[in-house]
Amino acid sequence: NAGVTQTPKFRVLKTGQSMTLLCAQDMNHEYMYWYRQDPGMGLRLIHYSVGEGTTAKGEVPDGYNVSRLKKQNFLLGLESAAPSQTSVYFCASSTGTGPETQYFGPGTRLLVL
Amino acid sequence: KQEVTQIPAALSVPEGENLVLNCSFTDSAIYNLQWFRQDPGKGLTSLLLIQSSQREQTSGRLNASLDKSSGRSTLYIAASQPGDSATYLCPSKIIFGSGTRLSIRP
């Protein structure tokens, strides 16, 4: 089991460029999440999904879009990157039922110049 | 708005001390609570999960308790070691606080 993996690990973008972050999990989890973490702060939820084909907004969704076309993958897109989106992005997954243990990926560091 | 508050925000102690990290949350409908540690530049590692039917959970030198009625959880670390240095987080479902940054001095 690889658990939760994220691609890429690090990326530098120029303002206005677009990119997609990929999260993959091999635990057959229903729920998947995208968070961002800024220096000295806790994680904030961007978007989440409660199953294949579903997505929902979290606390800070503006400037991001997501898709969950396959159960094991959750994509986070930045259509037009802004310096304010410089952050570390974490993906997580959970079963959605019973004791809700979240499993986190290693993170993607994004720098927008 | 749901919130999680962790006290203290930072803590530096010599090796060997017993520690208490506090977490308070406003969501009274919490089903369970999970404690994580995060090492600098790394992802989150799950330490303990306390289910709503439990009052505490133990793993090695770690013991976590949960009091849903008061909206509080406590993480107790016995005989602290330099390897325990990290930021500790206790999200309430999907709501995270800023964590407690722990430093254990050799």
Image (spheres, coloured by chain):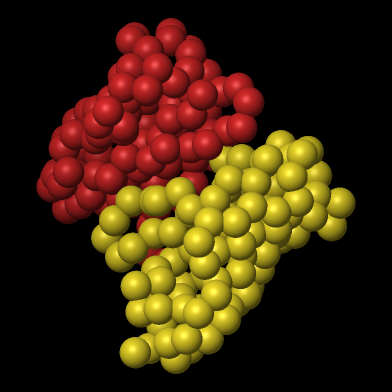
Chain colours: A red, B yellow
The image position of residue B74, as x and y in percent, is: 67, 64
Name the residue at 32% across, 25% down: A25
The image position of residue A73, as x and y in percent, is: 31, 19
Q: Is residue B11 visible?
A: no
Q: Residue furthest right?
A: B69
The image position of residue A43, as x and y in percent, is: 46, 50
Name the residue at 65% across, 46% down: B50
Q: Residue furthest front?
A: B60
Q: Quadrant of the N terminus of chain A?
A: top left
The image position of residue B77, as x and y in percent, is: 55, 71
Asked whether A84 or A93 is in front, the reply is A93
Instruction: In the rendered view, tell whether residue B4 sits above or below residue B86.
Output: above
Instruction: Please tell me in which quadrant of the rendered image residue B67 appears.
Output: bottom right
Asked whether A27 or B38 is in front, the reply is A27
Residue A99 shown left or right of residue A24 in the figure: right
Residue A75 shown left or right of residue B18 in the figure: left
- What count of labels does the image hold? 0
Name the residue at 56% across, 23% down: A96
Residue B38 shown left or right of residue A81 in the figure: right
Asked whether B53 or B69 is in front, the reply is B53
Instruction: Please tell me in which quadrant of the rendered image residue A39 appears.
Output: bottom left
Name the residue at 32% across, 44% down: A89
Q: Is residue B94 visible?
A: yes
Residue B46 shown left or right of residue B27 in the figure: left
Asked whether B18 or A87 is in front, the reply is B18
Instruction: In the rendered view, tell whether residue B37 sits above or below residue A71.
Output: below
